Image (cartoon, grey):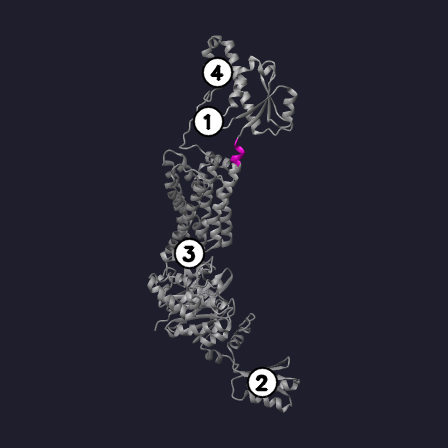
Amino acid sequence: MLSLAGYHIRAMLRNNGILIWVVAFPIILATLFMVMFDGMMSNQQAGTIAVGVLADGNYQAPAAEPLRAILGALAEEGPGEEAFLALTSYADADEANDALIAREVEVLVTVDADGAPQMSVPPNSLNSTHEAMVQAVLDRYLQSEAAVSELARNDPAALASPEAVAALTADLMGDEAQTAEVSVLRVDPSEMARFYYALLGFSTAMGANVASVLTERLKANLSPVGARCQVSSMQPARQLGAVLIASWVIVFCCLMAAFCYIRFVANVSFAGREALAPVACAACALVSCALGMALWALPWLSANVKDAVLTVGVLVLALPAGLYGEPALGLSDWLTQHMPWLQAINPSVQAANAFYALTYYDSLVPFFQTLSTILAIAAVLFAVAALCMRRQRYASL
Amino acid sequence: MTDVVSVSNLVKRYGDLVALDHFSLRVAPGEILGLLGPNGSGKTTAINCMLQLLTYSQGSIELFGQPMTPARYDLKRKIGVVPQQVAVFDELTARENIDCFCSLYVSDRAERRVLVDAALDFVGLRDFQRFRPRKLSGGLLRRLNIACGIAHRPELIFFDEPTVAVDPQSRNAILSGIQRLRDEGATVVYTSHYMEEVEQICSRIVIMDHGRVLAQGTADELKRMISTGEKIEIEVADLPAAVLAALRALPHVISAVYEAGVLRVSCEASQRNLMDVLDALGRADVAVGRVWSEPPTLNDVFLEITGRELRDETPEAGR
């Protein structure tokens, strides 16, 4: 059996189709993700926002003092950080508008007679992220102003002393003013990392091709080589065992290669639990083999139909794992919430979940629970394959 | 001595089509049995039933005196199969292929090495042992196909049309190889629709059509079963109808046909057929060109039994 497994491994490593789809494709896809996500991340870098300020009488009035203070603070560079805003003051309104139209500044801030800030954007503005960010700052300022005015009206004593005003201002304007960020995960979640986990789930399903090609070679109704194997004196169970060993070794190595590429080249974090990744890969390789063997052991369909079913199946299984972008991730979350059983029987989803659980949860219990689910799916599929392979004679060939 | 193969009243149906119709067969040890019939006559189906690849509706199959079932791995160990289609792994070299299929029967690596070497030498592929199948010619590929089926030294070997699409040189190598296997003690069941090679190597021949055995015996026995004893062909520029009628009236002449300048005469077995025909032509002053005379072939046997030609397709070039 081991000799046969060895030859199966050798044959698969020389099979161009397997090399392309099972070995190279996940790495190619990971590379595409890297390029794509790198662009997206750079787009999300805020950078310094060029803001024009009309430094007229309203802006210089005492009522606008808090606004000046805020804008001034945001225009200062922090330790190791560039300034959030780059302020340019204009004494004249026309000059300020010309600068805005010429897009020398992205936003123009003016102050009205009541001391309320107003924001102008260039004509044909595209509602850029920078505009939204400045708008958010001004909105927050206005909300705080309104809150202070309300407080002064209802509880003047609260603003009686300078200390009280300073404390209130700090509460309203400080970084920790309203909410505290609490995380139940070991590391900060990364939206991009989910795609890589989904990619490992996809690779798991794609790995079924190895077992399928090898199982096809055991069945007399699927290939001439299968007929030769079937009339031999080696029992089908032992031949199936050889296929299992060979396909597991190949898929495991492919998953490990994909994992290493994702970890060390794409630099996706597994939060210091890389040592457990081979365990996840081993379980995923097992379910991958079981999937291919079960499909190809079915007595009903021709090899071409099975091939098509597997190709489509791999793509469909990877969809709820979230491989195909934000909508797929949304679908994944929706299915997890409303149809968890469907996610539970999907090898791709479970494989992706295993790496997610490995990375993010404090406890390893969810990780091993996911592995148990994967092994249970594999056991069912192996049982199907073994039952179908017991059928040794055909009505026609 | 117990028959190596004993098949009785085998019936195999594909829906309404009866592929094997109470097919019976016995093969004695050390025999090369030729299963001769046109394409679709049921030869491969019969072999697949014997190998337990196909289910069948009725009948019994015994190999080596024991009932054959899918789980008789002890019997399968003694059987070698050379299928009609080349069945090898494209990704493995010739040597690896032989060793791989041998490993389905023999687990000991050292023992296998000896067997693989012997198989390579037997089919003459030693120089090509590191070649992958796609680098081999059609004839060499067929030889590899044979080596994969015989490397484990089986006692009973099924050859299912092993010479289809093979050049004459490789064909001769294959046929002489099969005879050597027989000489070394193997029993061979050989299917073909090429009567010449069946006649060349088989000690006994079974002619089948429509899943039925039509006749069996040695080549000579089969030829004696039919009325045609000699076939004469003569090139004649012009043959008057009266002369043709006179030829048909000759004793021992079964039929005489004149077509495209060639006179074809079928005769019963007799010592003087050719002389009688040439005398009749001479008496009528008919000018004679080239003359051929030959005993009946298996095709004549098949033609007389079934009313149609054995070879129902154009033979490949070079055959």
| Number of residues whose C-alpha sits closer than 10 Å to that of mark 1, classed few (under 14), some (14–19) or many (20 or more) | few
- The kind of residue on which mark 4 rests is Thr
First along the sequence among labels 3 and 1? 3
- What element does badge 2 sit on? strand
| Number of residues whose C-alpha sits closer than 10 Å to that of mark 2, classed few (under 14), some (14–19) or many (20 or more) | some
Alpha-carbon span between mark 4 and mark 1: 23 Å
Q: On the image, which quarter does residue A54 sit in?
A: top right
Q: Position of residue B215 (x, y in %)?
A: 47, 74
Classify A32 as above or below A137: below
Label 3 and label 1 in one chain: yes
Q: Which chain is indicated by disc 2?
A: B
| Number of residues whose C-alpha sits closer than 10 Å to that of mark 4, classed few (under 14), some (14–19) or many (20 or more) | some
Alpha-carbon span between mark 2 and mark 4: 126 Å
Alpha-carbon span between mark 4 and mark 3: 72 Å
The residue identified by callout 3 is A10
Give yes or no for contact between labels 2 and 1 (Cβ–Cβ under 8 Å): no
Alpha-carbon span between mark 2 and mark 3: 61 Å
Q: Is residue A367 magenta?
A: no
Q: Residue shown at 44%/77% (left/top)?
A: B218
Task: Tell me, yes or no, if residue A217 can be seen here.
Answer: yes
Give yes or no for contact between labels 4 and 1 (Cβ–Cβ under 8 Å): no
- The kind of residue on which mark 3 rests is Arg
Closer to the observer: label 3 or label 1?
1
Q: Position of residue A324 (x, y in %)?
A: 52, 40
- The kind of residue on which mark 1 rests is Pro
Residue A169 disc label: 4
Residue B291 disc label: 2
- What element does badge 3 sit on? helix
Q: Which residues are magenta?
A: A40-45
The residue identified by callout 1 is A79
